[in-house]
Every structure is written in C-alpha cells, then in structure tokens.
Image (cartoon, rainbow, N blue to C red):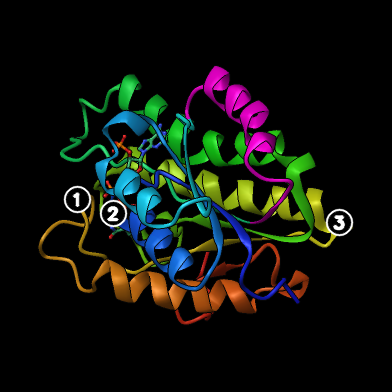
C-alpha cells in the first residue's frame, strides 16, 4: 500500500485549476508539497499559500514541455526534498476550436509535448527521487478514450491524452520492480479555465475524490486508467 499522509507530494501545473486545488488539499492534510509551475513569480495564489505554510510548500519553476526546464527542475528538487512519495502529473493544455482541414502542427506538437511527453520524460528524469513504493498519478481525460465513438473535436488534445495513457502503461512497467504504482486518472468534467463554465463538478470535489483514489492505489492497480470513484475506465 502507498505511504499514508503526510507525504512529500509534487504537483505540476500547480498555479491554477485542478493543480492549485491539489496543492490546497495536500497542504490541508499535512503533506510537504512541491508546487511546480511555469512562472512562479506570477503565481500569486501559490506564493500566498507558501507564506501561510512556511517550510511546507516550495514553489519551483517547471515547463513540462521543455527538456532544459525538466533537467533544471530535477537538479533543483533535491535542494527542497529528499524524496517524492506522490507525483501528480497534472499540467495540461487543450487547444480549443480545432477544425478538420486546419489542425496545425504547432497545436498537435504542443499538445504532445505538454500532455504526453512531459509527464513521461519528467517521471523518467525524477526516477532517482521517487521513493520505492511511490505513486505517480497522470491526469488524463475521458477524451483520451478510444471507445465510445468520440466526436471530431479537440483532436490534438485527444491524441495527446491517448498517448499519455500508453505512457502511463510504460511507466508502470518500468517502475514496477521498485513497487512504484503509476495510474492514469480521469477527473470528470471540472469547472476550471479548461473545463469552462458549463462543467459538471467543482475542482474541490474532483480533487478530493481523486486523492481518495490515489491513496488507495497500490502496485496491484498500476497501469490502470481510473475515474474519480476508482472504477476502471475504458482505454
Ligand atoms: P487549466 O485550468 O487550463 O490549468 C492548466 C494548468 O496546466 C495551468 O497551471 C497551466 O499553467 C499548466 N500548464 C500548461 N502547459 C504547461 C507546461 N508546458 N508546463 C507546465 N505547466 C503547464 O486546466 P485544468 O482543468 O486545471 O486541467 C488540469 C489537468 O486536468 C490537465 O491535464 C487536463 O487535461 C486535465 N483534465 C481537465 C478536465 C476539466 O474538465 N477541467 C477534464 C479532464 C482532464 P499556465 O498557467 O502557465 O498556463
């Protein structure tokens, strides 16, 4: 079973949306949190939280899509923690309004770099800092699913999240010898900048459900795609 809270938890894309809510809830339960975001200087909510939780929240720069940034982050991380018990690969991008005939290479490439390559290569770069028995949670989406006859919308996002699911499976296999569980999680349709105002659930409810799922994940569930209630999602 994974280590019970408090843990040393790392969240990417932590400055807003689901990422910021993960940070709130992880701090509330006593974790030591490393919040990674592209522009810490502009991350006012995170910096305010850091002031309220001295020594328990570190805000570090990380662009998950950028190799140099990932490498610099991996070097900086040991300065603030000796290990990571929980890695939440949350950062993600959705390029809306894509139309067949004008889907751009730039959007597709950015989506793949951010949503699939980022989590895979960041996890690889942090392998030495993940403790044995750690949990890696990749925030995927129901839009990744190959089943269910999906409409043609947000193709770059869908393609990249489907790739993230396979990245999850590959990470699960690579890290199994160390008892590290890697899962893909579907947060539901959530009220954030990405989810929009028509979404179904609050970030608070989504994250609290996801953390219960994460807490229950052990090596037996590694390589699975789970919804926020812990049920298996169709690939
Ligand atoms: P959001 O409100 O748009 O926030 C996205 C976060 O990701 C921001 O912090 C953003 O940072 C960060 N990010 C984007 N590209 C990045 C990069 N290259 N490096 C580092 N950080 C980067 O989205 P959200 O709804 O919170 O989504 C969080 C995760 O949940 C995503 O993986 C998303 O695909 C997934 N998800 C969301 C929903 C939903 O309904 N909301 C549903 C299914 C899955 P900046 O502020 O610097 O842009």
Mark 3 is surrounded, within 10 Å at the Cα level, by few (under 14), some (14 to 19) or many (20 or more) other residues, namely: few
Asked if the residue at label 1 sits under 8 Å from ligand 1, the reply is yes
Q: Find residue 193 and name its label.
A: 1
Residue at image point 79% right, 40% down? 128
Q: CA distance from mark 3 to mark 2?
A: 32 Å
Residue at image point 55% right, 34% down? 117
Residue at image point 78% right, 54% down? 131
Q: Is residue 90 visible?
A: yes
Q: Which residues are magenta?
A: 65-85
* Secondary structure of the residue carrying numbered label 2: helix
Q: Earlier in the sequence, mark 1 or mark 2?
A: 2
**Circle 2 is placed at which residue position?**
17
**Quadrant position of residue 106:** top left
- Dot in front, 1 or 2: 2
Q: Is residue 90 left or right of residue 190?
A: right
Q: Nearer the viewer, residue 20 or 136?
A: 20
* Secondary structure of the residue carrying numbered label 1: loop
**Circle 3 is placed at which residue position?**
178
């Amino acid at each position: 079973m994974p280590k019970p809270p408090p843990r040393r938890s790392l969240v990417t894309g932590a400055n807003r949306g689901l990422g910021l809510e993960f940070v709130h809830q992880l701090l509330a339960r006593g974790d030591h949190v490393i919040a990674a975001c592209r522009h810490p200087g502009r991350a006012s909510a995170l910096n305010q939280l850091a002031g309220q939780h001295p020594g328990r929240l570190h805000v570090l720069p990380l662009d998950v899509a950028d190799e140099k940034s990932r490498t610099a982050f991996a070097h900086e991380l040991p300065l603030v923690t000796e290990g990571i018990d929980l890695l939440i690969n949350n950062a993600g991008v959705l390029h809306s309004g894509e139309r067949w005939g004008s889907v751009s290479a730039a959007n597709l490439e950015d989506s793949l770099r951010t949503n699939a390559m980022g989590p895979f290569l960041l996890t690889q770069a942090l392998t030495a800092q993940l403790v044995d028995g750690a949990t890696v949670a990749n925030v995927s989406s129901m839009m990744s699913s190959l089943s269910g006859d999906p409409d043609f919308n947000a193709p770059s996002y869908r393609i990249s999240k489907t790739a993230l699911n396979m990245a999850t499976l590959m990470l699960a296999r690579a890290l199994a010898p160390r008892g590290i569980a890697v899962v893909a999680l579907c947060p539901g349709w959530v009220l954030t900048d990405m989810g929009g105002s028509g979404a179904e659930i609050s970030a608070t409810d989504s994250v609290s459900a996801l953390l219960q799922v994460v807490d229950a994940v052990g090596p037996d569930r590694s390589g699975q795609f789970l919804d926020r209630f812990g049920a298996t999602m169709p690939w």
